[in-house]
Amino acid sequence: MIEEGLELKEACLEHCSHLLADQLATLSSSLESIRGSRSSETKSSAGDKFETGRAMLQLEENNLKQQLAAALETRRLLDQAHRSTTGDRIAHGNLVATNRGIYLLAAGFGKIKVKTRDVFCISPGSPIGRRLLGKIAGEAFLFNEVRFQVLGFV
């Protein structure tokens, strides 16, 4: 049972890493495109239009930089989860089986399907993640007036 859980955990972390790599590649490509557009903008006789265009490109670049910073933070959380070990209590990086589903406490990717199983990839800082942290196998808790019971974790 534990070995199967560890395999599922690794498969989930791999899946999330691939999703993140795709996201990082898209963000980097978009940033390069914006930088290229901004440098190729030439000032025309319609100066206001030029300035508005540059301002819009700058806003978009800033937005992409924020998204990139968030994605890099997600990568840091995934790296931590890869290095985590199982202790007595649920912590960052654990794969947790409950009566309401399986949760990976690593980073917020939402529901993924791995090895024919649905797994909710959540951040430990999310509302349900905060409720799971520190629990032990067999412990129950309420979340949004719904009873959850921890069946086990790796």
Image (tube, rainbow, N blue to C red):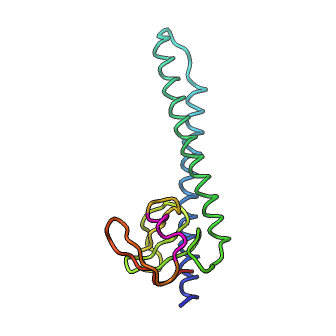
Relative to 53, residue 146 above or below: below
Classify residue 39 by image quadrant.
Answer: top right
Question: How many numbered discs sit on the rendered protein?
Answer: 0
Q: Quadrant of the C terminus?
A: bottom right
Relative to 22, residue 95 above or below: below
Seen as rendered, the residue at the extreme left is 145
Q: Nearer the viewer, residue 49 or 90?
A: 90
For the point 58% across and 64% down, the residue is 17
Identify the main secondary structure in magenta. Answer: helix
Seen as rendered, the residue at the extreme top is 45
For the point 49% across and 64% down, the residue is 130
Taking the magenta stretch, the answer to whether it contains residue 130 is yes
For the point 53% across and 72% down, the residue is 12
Residue 153, how many percent across, how many down?
53, 80
Classify residue 117 by image quadrant.
Answer: bottom left
Residue 15, how many percent across, how many down?
53, 69
Seen as rendered, the residue at the extreme bottom is 1
Q: Nearer the viewer, residue 48 or 82?
A: 82
Residue 96, how many percent across, how many down?
50, 77
Relative to 77, residue 102 above or below: below
Q: Nearer the viewer, residue 152 or 11?
A: 152
Q: Is 44 on the left-hand or right-hand side of 83? A: left
- Where does the magenta region start and end? 128-135
Taking the magenta stretch, the answer to whether it contains residue 146 is no
